[in-house]
Image (cartoon, helix red, strand yellow):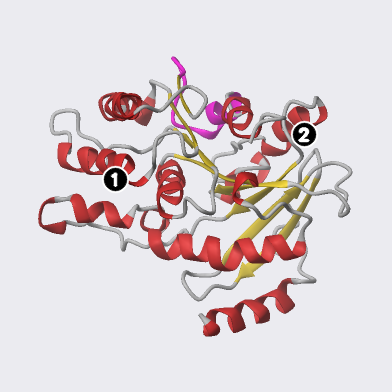
Amino acid sequence: MKKILVFLCAALVLLSCARERDGEAMKVSKGQLTIYPDFPSAFVAPRTIRVWTPENYDPAQRYDVLYMHDGQMLYDASVTWNNQEWCVDEVMDSLIASGAIRPTIVVGIDYNPDNRIGEYCPDDVSLLLPDSAAVYDDFPSQGNAYLRFLVYELKPFIDSAYATYPEREHTWTMGSSCGGLISSYALCQYPEVFAGAACMSTHCTLAYPDPAHPDAAKMAAYREYLRTHIAPNSAKLYMDQGDKTLDAFYGEAQTAINAMLRAEGWDSAHFEYRYFPGHAHCEDDWSARLDEPIMFLLKNGEF
């Protein structure tokens, strides 16, 4: 732990003056975006961190923090690989300005292009598989390491550099697809850190699904992990899906998760599932419904 703290202090000095260097082309239309390239870590590969602060950000005020995965895709379609984005700045700005949600900082964490799936893998689900089989055969599992980076390195930096409420009831996480997996896993692994997770189009099959040969063991293992690691109504959990492209394969696994959570006693104030017919597995469709999970997590007056 001492080694980690020393490393963190060095990182804070290095990053204290970092601004948009490697991401000058990335812009937001609302609020301010500050980019920290090559954020170092003792646990995972360095990556860019993209911090959005609301209009009229005031260091004398305090803010909730939403940690979002796939940071490259959140703010500016002109620089993403598929020319799509989540429109995080526009959606957050509108909800904050209307008073619908609490003032919130968004921390976009870039994925590792060399091992995105591995870093978003819920490692310990493998313990519930036959013979402790790997969750993903082709990708090194680094979900535990990625979450250590988020909790022990990134969050302390954000809480020291920005006017945040550092407490659990003001700390949230969100992602889509495998980013949905790691968001739910964060809630399981660090219930003392995160008060809620939004998981959009969650890759709950834990495999690229073949309709003829669904991997029932992996689906069941992930479901059982959720059941045994999040106490009912102890946090907020949002899950959703569309029915086009990859989302079309999630129905069986997601329906079983929904049934399990409700059977365990999760109420509508703490668990929300939404189904969006016609929505595909893409940023344009996640953007179109982004207000739903954000409102569920951050509704003004609720904690």
How many numbered marks are there?
Answer: 2
Rendered-image quadrant of the C terminus? top right
In this picture, residue 16 sits left or right of residue 192: right
Q: Secondary structure at mark 1?
A: helix
Q: Which mark is residue 211?
A: none
Q: Which mark is residue 225?
A: 1
Q: Is residue 43 above or below residue 174?
A: below
Residue indicated by mark 2: 93
Q: Secondary structure at mark 2?
A: helix
In this picture, residue 189 sits left or right of residue 162: left
Provide residue 274's location: percent of width, then percent of height: 46, 21
**Residue mark closest to the camera, 1 vs 2:** 1
Q: Is residue 21 visible?
A: no
Residue at (61% x, 84% y) in the render: 6
| Residue type (three-letter) at the residue carrying disc 1 | Tyr
Which is more N-terminal, label 2 or label 1? Answer: 2
The one nearer the camera, 203 or 9, is 9
Residue at (41% x, 54% y) in the render: 189
Q: Is residue 100 above or below residue 38?
A: above
What segment is highlighted magenta in the picture?
A: 275-288
| Residue type (three-letter) at the residue carrying disc 2 | Asp
Provide residue 146's location: percent of width, then percent of height: 46, 62
- Whether the magenta-drawn stretch holds residue 71 is answered as no
Q: CA distance from mark 1 to mark 2?
A: 35 Å
